Image (tube, rainbow, N blue to C red):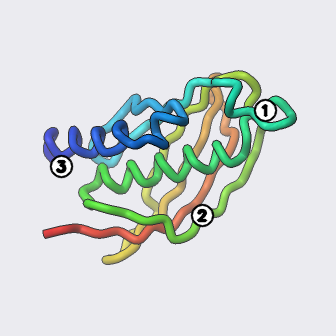
Amino acid sequence: MVASELDRVRADFEDSEYFRFLGLEITKLEEGDVELRLPYKPELDNVRSTVHGGVFMSVLDTVMGLHIRSIGYDDTMTIQMQTQFLRPLVGGAMTARAEVINRTKSTVLLEGRLYNEADELIGYSTGTFKVMKFD
């Protein structure tokens, strides 16, 4: 994938209202190698003063979708996600990474992982995504 295509992918995500609402930052975007960071903000906490599980899932879904776009697909849709919550996140940033487990002509299966600032795994997800290429 050429740099201009990766720039377009970056713009697609960074121009998203939801991406900006959450406060996500793309810290790495290379072909097949992406990383997102979500700085802590108290508005994302649940009633227990830990980051809400829905935020975990949103970040995982986004990093897996970004990964798919970084490997050359023009569009993707989440078909299924299963998430495991391993540790709560209290007042710190999270980092997300993803990798492909399997690909077919029309779907990609990935694993997304979330880490706290101490680089401890706090959650992970597997997701199946429908993928499209426009040509």
The residue carrying mark 3 is: 1
Q: How many marks?
A: 3
Q: Is residue 102 shown to the viewer in this render?
A: no
Query: Are discs 1 and 2 less than 8 Å apart at CB?
Result: no
The residue carrying mark 1 is: 50
**Amino acid identity at mark 2:** Met
The residue carrying mark 2 is: 81
Which residue is painted at 38% across and 50% down in the image?
Answer: 67
Q: Where is residue 25 in the image (x, y as percent from the top left)?
A: 44, 30
Question: Quadrant of the rendered structure where residue 47 is?
Answer: top right
Q: Where is residue 27 in the image (x, y as percent from the top left)?
A: 40, 29
Between circles 1 and 3, the one closer to the viewer is 1
| SS assignment at label 1 | loop
| SS assignment at label 3 | loop
| Residue 96 position (above or below residue 37) | below
Q: Decide if residue 127 is on the left or right side of residue 11.
A: right
Question: Quadrant of the rendered structure where residue 119 is?
Answer: top right
Q: In which quarter of the image is the C terminus?
A: bottom left
Pointer 1: residues within 10 angstroms few (<14), some, or many (20+)? some
| Residue 13 position (above or below residue 100) | above
| SS assignment at label 2 | strand
Which residue is painted at 47% across and 46% down in the image?
Answer: 63
Q: Decide if residue 56 is on the left or right side of residue 45.
A: left
Q: Where is residue 83 in the image (x, y as percent from the top left)?
A: 67, 56
Pointer 3: residues within 10 angstroms few (<14), some, or many (20+)? few
Mark 1 and mark 2 lie on one chain; the one further toward the N terminus is 1
Residue extending furthest bottom? 105
| Residue 95 position (above or below residue 97) | above
**Amino acid identity at mark 1:** Thr
**Amino acid identity at mark 3:** Met
